[in-house]
Each structure stands twice: as structure tokens, then as C-alpha cells.
């Protein structure tokens, strides 16, 4: 497939992005559009075509540029690598999926449609013109039959073998040599070409013909004896129902249908879950606060400390207290200004557990040391506080009039009260009353 062939897909994605130029979208709003619109367009194409790697990289580049810079599509403004974004939320990502993995899943789905004897016209055409009633597993990759996409499907067979299995019924739809129907796996992989002579069963045989056309022999090789035993056992268990193709969903759990999510989980390289994600992506959080808190924990904000890495002459002092080095730890919440705001918001909630040190705060919002109501309020206050403080910090750096701590405290109080009032006490059994009590109001 050439660049000209997939250019309509690139144009469709650019066209969608251009229609959003007149709207004011936050980072989390752009993320939602990428997840629900741009990725859906890509998935629709991938479900029917195997797109080249260059196309997938171009789509991901557009999505990354749109997320961090909006319709300007500036690729240099990315705060987090795209590979890190495309991880599950419990592994520190944003829940997007790499298109290379999505493409692999859809390729396996096409394999499943072929080997499950689907009644679609596409499968019937493949069986008639490309397989010639032979086994899908026995076609050589160097074959000149079919298109570029067909050869890509053939290259997915080694991976598909780990997922496919057949439950024998009457044995009439299963290849004796190439399908995985026995506990030993693919018989041809176990015995090789020599096994055809040793067992006396032709390569084109199905399991049912192996039952009726051969008699049990004695062999000196253990593998051959095992196959004879398995064949005899299957003969006694044979039923009149058709054979059932199965697909692995997890471990040794096979089912008679394809599941994209389960397949994706099995083919990806899963990383360890991170404990701090529980304090970011929790039920009833505000999306823009959660996204910003995710950036804070990953230390991707343009604080004075980080700006000094790429600009030696940058102003690294804290805009609140004039400390010579503005770091994440200082801004949240060692600075005298931010400490006053943080103490107002959380000291009444935590009492003796109150702390303004970053390494004490992070375990507390991530763990289960607090009761349900206090934990929700503490997490929500943390996210609202860092978001509002960062906006105040940026406003002062751009020359706007500074707000005293009391104004910031009122902003946080308003956010928490509105959120608790919106959810209602049925969700958190008196969280709003607990917040009033903590504020002394």
C-alpha cells in the first residue's frame, strides 16, 4: 500500500482537527476527541486494511501534536512521549492504545474470520481462490497468490497459533496435520515431514479421515505413540456436531468467539501497575483536574527547575515567595504561599496526619489509610489545589494582579462544595457535611 492509497485517511483526520479550530478545548477535551473520534476513524480503517507503519506513525504524530498544541499541530510542544500516553491508566498512561498493537489485533481478527469458517463473502472468496480448499496454516509465505495485505495476514500466523485451538466434534472441518486439535499442539510441528511417512496419514487428511482410514500402529518413538493414543481417544469421544474453533481469551481459557480487548491484553507487554494512579483516576473526579494532577506527578510542568535545563538564562525563582529555585516540591507545598493555602484546605481533614511534604502526600492520596469520605475529599482537594495554584502562578508570571491566599482558599472551597453538592450525599454519605466540619463552617 502506497502513501497515495492511505492519504484519504490522513486527510479525514486533518479535516476533523480543522473543524475544531474555533472551539476552546482543554487538554482533557482534546484527549477525549482523540480517543472517541480520531482513534475511531483509524480503527474503522484498520478493521478492513492493514496499514503501513508510515501511515500509523503519521496518525499518531497528528494526534500527539493536536493534544499538546491544538489545531496548530506543533510537534515540539509535547510534554509526555506518545509511547507513555499509550499505556493503561494504572500503568501511568492515559488509556490510549498504540496503533501498531491495534493493527496487530485486527490482523488476528481477520485470521480468526478465516479459520472459523465464517459465512462472509470475503472468507468464501479466500477459500476458493487463495486456499483452494487447503489449510490456512500450510500456505507458504513466499506464495505469489493474493495481495500485499494477504501476505501480511500470512505473516501473523505464528502469533495466531498461540491463540487458536479446535474442539473436535465430528472431525470433518479440522486438518489433522495443521490445526491445533490435540494436547500436543500442531501435529506437523511436533513430527515434521517425516511424521507423514511414520503415521501413514496424508498431509491433506482431516481428523475424521484419520479415524476411519488408519489402524493403530506400534511405534518406537514416544511422540508417535502419544499421537496414536490421542487419536484413539478422540475417536471414542467423537460426536455428530461440527468441530468448534476456539480463541484464547486468557491463560488456558478458550472461547468460541473473538474478543479484541482480551487479545490486546495478551499481545502487549504489560508493565507493573503504579500505586499513585489510584489517587489520580478515581470515581467522581473532575477530568481536567485529574489530567493536570497526572502531569504534576510525572513532573512535566514548566517549573523554574525544569526550565533551567533547556534555558540557562530562564528566571527560576518562585513567583510567590522569591525562592531562587522553583521546583515541584517547593511549589507543592513548601512555598510559604502555597503552604498556607494547602494547610487551610487539608489540615482540618487530616488533623495529626497533615503534611506539606510531597513524599508524604503522594502515598496518602494513593493508599487506603483514610476512610472513604476523607479519602475522596483529600484526593479532590489535592487536584483542585495544584490546578488553581498553577493558574495563579502563570497569571502572575504574565503580569496579572496577584491574589492573596484568602482568594485562592475561597476558590478551592467553592470547587469542593459544588462537587459534593452535585454528587449528593447518597454517593459519599455526608462528604459535604464533613467538608463543612473541616472548614469550621
Image (cartoon, rainbow, N blue to C red):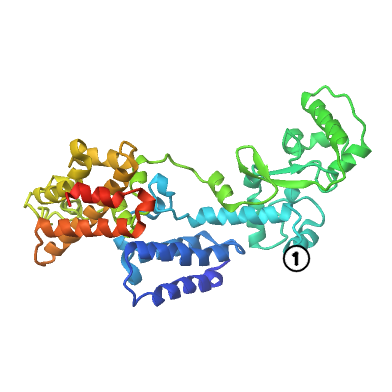
| Direction from residue 291 to residue 401 in the image, left or right | left
Q: Quadrant of residue 45?
A: bottom right
- Report the side of 247 relative to 178 (left or right): left
Up the image or down, 17 lies above or below 313; here it is below
The image position of residue 234, as x and y in percent, is 83, 35
Does 107 sit above or below residue 202?
Answer: below
423, above or below 328, in the image:
below
Of residues 147 and 23, the one drawn nearer to the viewer in this rendering: 23
Q: Secondary structure at mark 1?
A: helix
Q: Residue at x 73, y 52 (%)?
A: 115
Percent x, y for residue 358?
21, 42
Q: Position of residue 288 (x, y in %)?
A: 32, 59
Residue 102 spot, x, y in % from top left: 53, 55
| Count of numbered circles in the view | 1
Looking at the figure, which quarter contains the N terminus? bottom right
Mark yes or no: residue 106 visible. Answer: yes
Q: Is residue 143 left or right of residue 298?
A: right
Picture quadrant of residue 33:
bottom left
Find the residue positioned furthest to the top. Answer: 220
Q: Residue at x 37, y 54 (%)?
A: 284
Can residue 298 be seen by looking at this rendering? no
Q: Looking at the image, which is closer to me, 405 or 66?
A: 405
Relative height, residue 178 to residue 131 (above, below): above
Rate crowding at label 1 as few (under 14), some (14 to 19) or many (20 or more) other CA atoms within 10 Å.
Answer: few
Q: Which residue is mark 1?
A: 121
Camera-nearest residue between 197 and 433: 433
Question: Could you tell me which residue is drawn at 33 percent across and 45 percent down?
Answer: 279
The residue shown at (89%, 27%) is 217
Amino acid at each position: 500500500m502506497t502513501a497515495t492509497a492511505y492519504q484519504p485517511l490522513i486527510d479525514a483526520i486533518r479535516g476533523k482537527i480543522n473543524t475544531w479550530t474555533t472551539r476552546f478545548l482543554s487538554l482533557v477535551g482534546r484527549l477525549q476527541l482523540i480517543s472517541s473520534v480520531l482513534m475511531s476513524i483509524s480503527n474503522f480503517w484498520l478493521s478492513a486494511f492493514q496499514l503501513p507503519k508510515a501511515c500509523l506513525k503519521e496518525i499518531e504524530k497528528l494526534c500527539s501534536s493536536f493534544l499538546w498544541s491544538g489545531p496548530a499541530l506543533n510537534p515540539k510542544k509535547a510534554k509526555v512521549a506518545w509511547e507513555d500516553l499509550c499505556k493503561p491508566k494504572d500503568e501511568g498512561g492515559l488509556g490510549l492504545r498504540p496503533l501498531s498493537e491495534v493493527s496487530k489485533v485486527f490482523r488476528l481478527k481477520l485470521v480468526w474470520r478465516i479459520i472459523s469458517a465464517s459465512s462472509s463473502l470475503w472468507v468464501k472468496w479466500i477459500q476458493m481462490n487463495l486456499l483452494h480448499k487447503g489449510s490456512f496454516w500450510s500456505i507458504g509465505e513466499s506464495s505469489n497468490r493474493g495481495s500485499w495485505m494477504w501476505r501480511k495476514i500470512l505473516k501473523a500466523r505464528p502469533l495466531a497459533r498461540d491463540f487458536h485451538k479446535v474442539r473436535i466434534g465430528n472431525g470433518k472441518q479440522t486438518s489433522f496435520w495443521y490445526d491445533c486439535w490435540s494436547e500436543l499442539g500442531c501435529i506437523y510441528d511436533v513430527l515434521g515431514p517425516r511424521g507423514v511417512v511414520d503415521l501413514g496419514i496424508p498431509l491433506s487428511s482431516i481428523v475424521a479421515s484419520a479415524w476411519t482410514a488408519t489402524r493403530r500402529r506400534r511405534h518406537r518413538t514416544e511422540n508417535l505413540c502419544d499421537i496414536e493414543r490421542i487419536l484413539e481417544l478422540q475417536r471414542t469421544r467423537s460426536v455428530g456436531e461440527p468441530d468448534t474453533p476456539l480463541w484464547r481469551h486468557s491463560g488456558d481459557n478458550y472461547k468460541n468467539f473473538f474478543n479484541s480487548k482480551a487479545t490486546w491484553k495478551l499481545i502487549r507487554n504489560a508493565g507493573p501497575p503504579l500505586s499513585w494512579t489510584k489517587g489520580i483516576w478515581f470515581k467522581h473526579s473532575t477530568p481536567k483536574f485529574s489530567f493536570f494532577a497526572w502531569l504534576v506527578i510525572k513532573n512535566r510542568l514548566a517549573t523554574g527547575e525544569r526550565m533551567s535545563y533547556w534555558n540557562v538564562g530562564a528566571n527560576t525563582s518562585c513567583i510567590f515567595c522569591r525562592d531562587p529555585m522553583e521546583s515541584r516540591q517547593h511549589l507543592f507545598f513548601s512555598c510559604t504561599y502555597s503552604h498556607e493555602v494547602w494547610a487551610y484546605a487539608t489540615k482540618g481533614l487530616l488533623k495529626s496526619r497533615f503534611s506539606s511534604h510531597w513524599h508524604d502526600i503522594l502515598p496518602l492520596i494513593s493508599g487506603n489509610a483514610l476512610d472513604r469520605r476523607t479519602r475522596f475529599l483529600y484526593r479532590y482537594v489535592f487536584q483542585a489545589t495544584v490546578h488553581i495554584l498553577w493558574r495563579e502562578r502563570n497569571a502572575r508570571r504574565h503580569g496579572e494582579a496577584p491574589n492573596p491566599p484568602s482568594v485562592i482558599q475561597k476558590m478551592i472551597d467553592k470547587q469542593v462544595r459544588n462537587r459534593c453538592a452535585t454528587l449528593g450525599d447518597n454517593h459519599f454519605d455526608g462528604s459535604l457535611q464533613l467538608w463543612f466540619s473541616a472548614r469550621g463552617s
